[in-house]
């Protein structure tokens, strides 16, 4: 028998419901399916107990079958907010990590331009090749919290995520006949890159998410160009340069344009200012983009990455933030305790990593050994 009042089978079914839907909806589904009424409080307690062995499960988890893995190991991290009860619904960051392998996908700068500018369906152009599918995607989530044995010590959720990524790297990078190249693919959040340096080391290919770069470039184009056509031409020209390894020239050109606009604005009276002159807010936006590009310069060698077949977009981790947090923990009206949020993150990432069944077997075995094992 289990330690609690609910059978292991009922716990399994209940968990499958509440990791996907709100506790109230999970309770209603159990009534419809089994004609068994279980309270929301009972499901919340079950969530806490069920998550207790997730860390131990992950520590002993072996690498996936080497022959089924991809050629590259990709590690990524991001953050998104969870509404907290003790903050009146204000957000606390949850940090999400993703690890997966994928085969190389060699492309050219023109391939990326066609995709970005949506010209791949033009007559005379071949259809884009299908992308390799990520293999054995595993997810992890953590939040900054007090240490269990000393509340004066704060555990950084980013450290938790990158410690797990380091474990995934150690487990999976050498599981094949040859070590896999390791790629860290993220947006420009400097604190995440700091934790990467501390816990993953330097022998990792660092790549700034291409779409974050493009988003900033497009924002700059709208401030510097008067028409949509001019903005599109602006983006295309500079994107081509960056993909061909000319990021330094693009940064220098943006600096010159910003400098000229500032000079022009100082020389003209307010009456004579045209809409092409920049407000202080617009100047700050452009300067922020320039700084962003400069700080991430070493991570924006997109031409090299394309030739090596490396991924350059972090859609998987951004999608994972939505799947892990937004689709379950950030629904309308939800408020979480820290313990409840951490437990749900642990259980939900286990489910989304396709490890649910293995984990249930693992935690049941641990509990049975603890309850019934005998020592001689």
Image (cartoon, grey):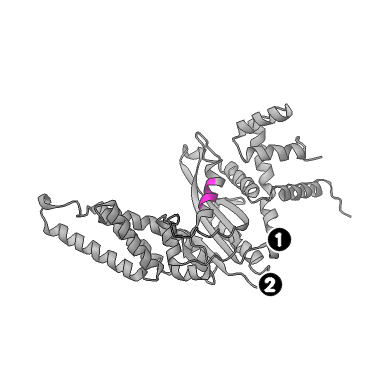
**Image position, residue 22 (x, y; %):** 59, 35
Question: Residue placed at 66% from the left, 31% from the top?
Answer: 29
Q: Nearer the viewer, residue 98 or 253?
A: 253
Residue 171 makes an appearance in the image: yes
Pointer 1 residue: 62
Say few, some or many: other residues with alpha carbon within 10 Å of mark 2 (under 14 / 14 to 19 / 20 or more).
Answer: few
Q: Secondary structure at mark 2?
A: loop
Are the residues at dot 2 and dot 1 in contact (C-beta closer than 8 Å)? no
User: Left of 296 or right of it: where is 56?
Assistant: right
User: Left of 151 or right of it: where is 252?
Assistant: left
Q: Quadrant of the N terminus?
A: top right
For the image, the number of numbered tags is: 2
Question: Residue placed at 67% from the left, 50% from the top?
Answer: 354
Question: Residue placed at 56% from the left, 62% from the top?
Answer: 74
**Secondary structure that dominates the magenta span:** helix
Q: Residue furthest front?
A: 124
- Image quadrant in which you'd find residue 41: top right
Mark 2 or mark 1: name the one nearer the start of the chain: 1
Name the front one of labels 2 and 1.
2
The numbered dot on residue 271 is none
Pointer 2 residue: 177
**Image position, residue 338 (x, y; %):** 56, 43
User: Left of 172 or right of it: where is 257?
Assistant: left
- Residue 26's place in the image compared with 371, above or below, is above
Magenta segment boundaries in residue numbering: 318-322
Q: Secondary structure at mark 1?
A: loop
Q: Nearer the viewer, residue 115 or 346?
A: 115
Say few, some or many: other residues with alpha carbon within 10 Å of mark 1 (under 14 / 14 to 19 / 20 or more).
Answer: few
Is 320 within the magenta? yes
């Amino acid at each position: 028998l289990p330690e609690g009042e609910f059978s292991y089978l009922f716990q399994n079914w209940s968990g499958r419901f509440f990791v996907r839907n709100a506790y109230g909806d999970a309770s209603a589904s159990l009534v419809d399916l089994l004609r068994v009424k279980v309270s929301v409080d009972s499901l919340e307690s079950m969530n806490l107990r069920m998550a207790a062995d997730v860390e131990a499960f992950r520590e002993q988890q072996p690498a996936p079958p080497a022959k089924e893995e991809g050629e590259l190991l990709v590690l990524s991290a991001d953050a998104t907010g969870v509404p907290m009860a003790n903050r009146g619904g204000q957000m606390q960051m949850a940090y999400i990590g993703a690890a997966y392998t994928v085969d190389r996908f060699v492309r050219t700068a023109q391939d990326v331009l066609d995709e970005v500018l949506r010209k791949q369906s033009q007559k005379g152009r071949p259809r884009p090749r299908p992308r390799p599918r990520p293999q054995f995607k595993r997810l992890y989530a953590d939040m900054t919290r007090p240490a269990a044995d000393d509340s004066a010590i704060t555990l950084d959720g980013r450290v938790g995520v990158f410690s797990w990524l380091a474990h995934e790297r150690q487990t999976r990078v050498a599981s094949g006949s040859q070590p896999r190249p390791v790629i860290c693919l993220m947006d420009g959040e400097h604190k995440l890159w700091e934790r990467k340096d501390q816990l993953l080391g330097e022998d990792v290919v660092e790549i700034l998410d291409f779409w974050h770069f493009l988003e900033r470039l497009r924002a700059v184009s709208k401030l510097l160009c008067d028409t949509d056509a001019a903005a599109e031409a602006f983006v295309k020209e500079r994107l081509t340069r960056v993909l061909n390894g000319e990021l330094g020239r693009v940064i220098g050109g943006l600096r010159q344009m910003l400098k000229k606009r500032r000079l022009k604005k100082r020389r003209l009276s307010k009456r004579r200012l045209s809409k092409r002159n920049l407000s202080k807010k617009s100047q700050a936006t452009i300067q922020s983009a320039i700084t962003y590009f400069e700080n991430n310069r070493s991570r924006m060698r997109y031409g090299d990455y394309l030739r090596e077949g490396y991924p350059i977009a972090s859609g998987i981790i951004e999608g994972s933030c939505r799947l892990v947090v937004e689709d379950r923990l950030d629904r309308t009206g939800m408020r979480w305790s820290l313990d409840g949020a951490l437990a749900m993150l642990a259980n939900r990432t286990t489910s989304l990593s396709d490890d649910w069944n293995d984990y249930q077997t693992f935690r049941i075995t641990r509990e049975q050994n603890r309850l019934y094992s005998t020592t001689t």
